[in-house]
Structure formats: C-alpha cells, structure tokens
Image (cartoon, rainbow, N blue to C red):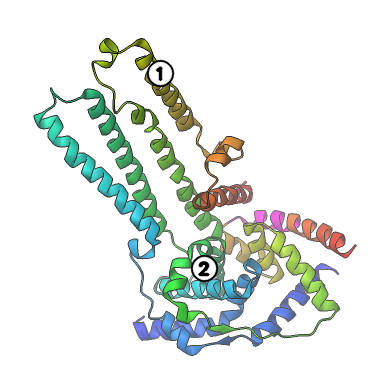
Amino acid sequence: MDKQDQQRFFEDIIEQHKGILFKVGRAYCPDVDDRQDLIQEMMIQIWLSIHKYNNQYKISTWLYRISLNVAISFYRKSSTRAKKYTGLNEQMVETPAGDQSENERQLNLLEQFISELKEIDKALMILYLEDKSHTEIAEILGMSVSNVGTKIGRIKGKLKARFSQLIS
Amino acid sequence: MNELELKKLWQTTNDKLEGSIVINKKNTDDITQVKVHGILGSMKPIKIFTLLAGILWVVIGIVALSPIYVNAFSEANKFFLLSASVQVLLTAIALTIYIYQLTQIYQVEIYDPILQTQKKLVQLKISTLWAARIMVLQLPVWTTFWWNETMLTERGILQWVVPIFFTIAFTFTAIWLFFNIKFENRNKKWFQLIFNGKEWTPLMKSMELLEQVEDYEG
C-alpha cells in the first residue's frame, strides 16, 4: 500500500469503526476532555500501525486490540504527544443523544459498574456487551476460548450482584 | 434486567451516540501526517534530561578517574578512588538497564493481543526495579569517599568508630534493599513508602496490572 492508499484506508476504517474507539474511550475515560485526548491517541496509534495490518484478523479485532491497549496503558503516558498535536483535540464532537428514561437510568447503572471494574475486566465487559463471540474475544485478549467462558461467567456474577445492590 | 436486555440497551444506546459522532476530516488528515518518533522523540523532556545527566555523570567519572589509575595510582587515596569507581560503575549499570528497557518498550506492538502486550509492557516497567536495586548498592560508597589510610592510625578511636559504624549500617541497608526491592514485596508498607512519589505511580499501577494479567492467564 502506498501512502495515499494508507490514508484512504485509515479514513475509511475510522469512519466505519469510530464506534469502537468511542465505546472504549467512554468506558475507560469518563471525562469528556480527557477522552478526546485518549481517542486522539488511539487514532494516532492506528495510523502508525496501519502499514502492519495483517488481514488474517478482522479489522474490528485489530482495532479493538489497539484501542484497548492504548486505553489501558498508553493513555497514562500520552501527555507529551497531546501537547504536540493540540490541534487534533476536536476531531470528534459528541452531541448528547437520547432522553432521560428508565433505559437511561439502567445505562447509568451499567456504566457505573463498568467504571468500577479493573482494566482487563473492563475490556472483557465491553467485548461481552458488544456480543462478540468467545473466539473473537479470545483473539482480542490473547487467551483461550475456554478461559473466556470462565471469566465471562465470573464477571456476569459480579454484574448481577452489583446491579441488585445498586437498584436496592 | 436480564442479560439480553442489558446487551440490547448497551448496543442501542451506543449506536444512537455513535450516530451523533462527527469525525473532523481535517484532523484525520493531520493525523496522517504524524510520523513515527524515535525513542527520544517519544520521551518526556524530564526523562531525556535525567538520561543525559546520567550519561554525562558517567562520562565525567570515567574521564576523571582514568588518568588517576594510569598515572597516579600509587599516590591516590585508594578509598576515594575505589568509592568513586564503584559509584560510576553502578550508575553505568543502572543506565544500561534503563536504556535497554526503553528500547524494548519501544518495540512492543500495540496491535498484539491485550494480555500479551500489557504483560510485556508492565514487565518492562517493573524491570525499573532492577535499576533501583542497583542504585541502592551505592549507599555505602557515599560514606567512604573521604576515608584515608591514616584514619585508623592517627585519629582517636571515636573518630573512626563512628564513620565505620555508618558504613556498616549503610552496607547492610543497601544489601537488604537490594534483595528485597522486588515485585513480591509491593504490598509491604516500607516498599510503598519508598516508592511513594508521583514518578513511581506508573510503576505501582503496572504491578497492579500484572496481577490482573496473571489472574487472566492463571
């Protein structure tokens, strides 16, 4: 792929899969301004890795790996880059959507539960809620399919307990 | 709310929000102008400064000590010479570990599976402990710089018992710290007291993360 093809490919995947970056960003970073920086760092890492994309994996698997790895680790160290590229801060504009309803309340409870999870549990929870197959979760996280089942079982138990606690 | 309803709620809400995200084309274009930075380019200025100061310290140490070994060894104060040499050597080893760690972190692929990438990153981060262990070994030599051959013969007993006591105490402390500054002791109070600054926060977080990764691998 030459540079122009890479640019086109990058723009296409960002446009088509922006939801992945956005959802991971929301789960790991509740503050909107910090989230802009986090999503910017994810995009930069995607761009810097794009020439190494291996199509043996689904593009979503590849994007989940990068965005989750950035959210878990790189974000803590991204201040240098954020200062260098301040002009990139506004590339994603979130506008409020939806009204306050019972669903919204349930979603708040769910987001509260996710925010309390540890980093890797959070990654698993996002993938579980996204309805990814155990095989794809195993590929993204780098663990066995059977272990995915066990960990999801554990996290569902926590979710159930936390939901009843939060509701009561 | 059951499992399916929960997933549906998550997906529909996020789909709705996703539809409202606007990607700014100009800024996407700007990102495609970002080039891969070298190791130095991706480091914070304070870290570059510390690294350069450390290298300069070692170079000055070598430049200053080498002529003494070559031309004036017999007249030199051996306590000073040995103390300074040990100090420079240990700083050089700690710097080597630090530079090795930086080059390895730089080679980690961000698109590899999460557990694999995170494990590599946190293990490298935790290897900072090795640099700290090497640095604490310097403790006793800071008490022996000013010793000299006439100290034992020409001075009163108190004048050499006190410094020797401090040197022995510093030696024991250094050896004890060298063997005990390790991942397994991260939850001990003395460990958290030593590694209690802002600059150590990523290291402590890395340790917590390694526990999670090991739990997942277990």
Q: Main secondary structure of the magenta part?
A: helix
Decide: few, some or many residues near mark 1? Use Cα within 10 Å; few <14, some 14-19, many ≥20.
few
Q: Position of residue B187 (x, y in %)?
A: 61, 39
Residue B197 image position (x, y, % from top left): 53, 48
Which residue type does callout 1 highlight?
Answer: Val
Q: Which residue has dot 2 on it? A: A66
Q: Is A115 left, or right, of B91 in this rendering?
A: right
| Magenta run includes residue B31 | no
Report the residue that reaches farthest toward the front.
Answer: B156
Placement of B186 over or under A74, stated as above or below = above
Give the foreground label among 2 and 1. 1
Report the front residue among B12 and A139. Answer: B12
**Number of the label disc, if any, that sits on residue B162:** 1
Secondary structure beneath dot 1 equals helix
Q: Is residue B78 above or below residue B189?
A: above
Q: Secondary structure at mark 2?
A: helix
Q: Which residues are magenta?
A: A143-153
In the rendered view, does A158 fall on the left or right side of B123?
right
Amino acid marked by disc 2: Ile
Closer to the camera, B38 or A8? B38
Q: Is residue B70 left or right of residue B143?
A: left
Residue B132 visible from this viewpoint: yes
Taking the view exactly as shown, the residue that stands out farthest to the left is B71
Give me the chain letter of mark 2: A
